[in-house]
Image (cartoon, grey):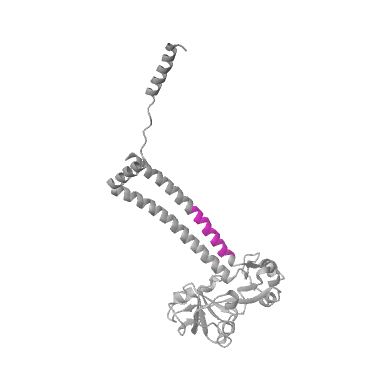
Amino acid sequence: MSAAATGRRWGRGDRGDRGRVAPSRLHTRDLVTIGLVGLSSRKVRSFLTAAGIAIGIAAMVAVLGISESSRADLLARLDRLGTNLLTVTPGISLGGGDVELPAVAPRMIARIGPVEAVSQVGYVDASVRRTDRIPEEETGGIAVQAADLALLDTIGARMAAGVWLNEATAGYPVVVLGAKAAERLGIGGPGVRVWLGDEWFTVAGILAPADLASDLDSAALVGFPVAAERLDHDGAASTIYVRTDPEQVNEVRSVLALTADPEDPSRVQVARPSDALEARAEAATAFTALFVGLGAVALIVGGVGIANVMLMS
């Protein structure tokens, strides 16, 4: 190779080396130092940025915690009360009028093999008031119902104060109040008298909130004997509660209407109260997912905005 060619080759190489500029790099230690200087020089902005991110994350955690806690509590109550409780109520006739359950319906339902317990309540045409000085039409939304002695065991309810009806008190002017009924009447314990119908009844106890029979929370419950003797109740049941074998709930449910009213099963409505609680649990899960999604979007948008402000500053 000639000297001129060699010179040209090396000359081009020298110019190429001189035209290439090495990239500038900031060491990690220097990067951290500069970042800390930026944060310390803008203390208010740094605090607000950190507080915004912390509040957003705390809000998401709180939403998750509250929703999951409520759902777990609801499912725990379902496990305690059981999903094998069914209710039988009168339907509506073809003409749109009210119908009544046959008087023998509770006894007929009790003959179904997997049925473990049967209880009934019946609406009474009477009102309950704190004193006889209150107008009769001011009922406070409290319904008077006759109840049999097995009601508490069948629906899985318990007493918050006092005692439940027994064979002796069911025939006397004695009443047990639901949780909301006692609250509306301003009664906190047994031994108080209330004006029920046209005479005084003594409060024997107050029910705790009944999860699977919420209608009883705003009811004043008396025995069937005293309801028939003093309140002109005909003994018809407005709701029949049926506790079944947990493994055969659907089978019992399919024959309840026909058993309660063989002549016209279409006039009987059968429901399972636990379905409403399960639906509430599912709704809580759906809302939790929605809230988490909205919270994640809000955090992303906020984070991008904060990063943009910090970068520009």
- Left or right of 91, for residue 175: left
Please determine whether, in this image, residue 5 is positioned above or below residue 42. above
Q: For residue 83, which quarter of the picture?
A: bottom right
For the image, the number of numbered tags is 0
Q: Quadrant of the C terminus?
A: top left
Pinpoint residue 272: horizontal percent, then vertical percent.
Answer: 61, 67
The answer to if 277 sits in the magenta stretch is: yes
In the depicted view, which residue is nearer to us: 190 or 24? 24
Residue 12 versus residue 125 in the image, above or below: above
Q: Residue at x 54, y 79 (%)?
A: 221
Residue 136 is situated, as x and y percent measured from the top left of the image, at: 47, 77
Percent x, y of residue 268: 65, 68
Is residue 4 toward the left or the right of residue 30 in the image? right
Queried whether the magenta region covers residue 127, the answer comes back as no
Q: Give the residues drawn in magenta, as a range.
A: 275-290
Closest to the observer: 100 or 75? 75
Which image quarter: residue 134?
bottom left
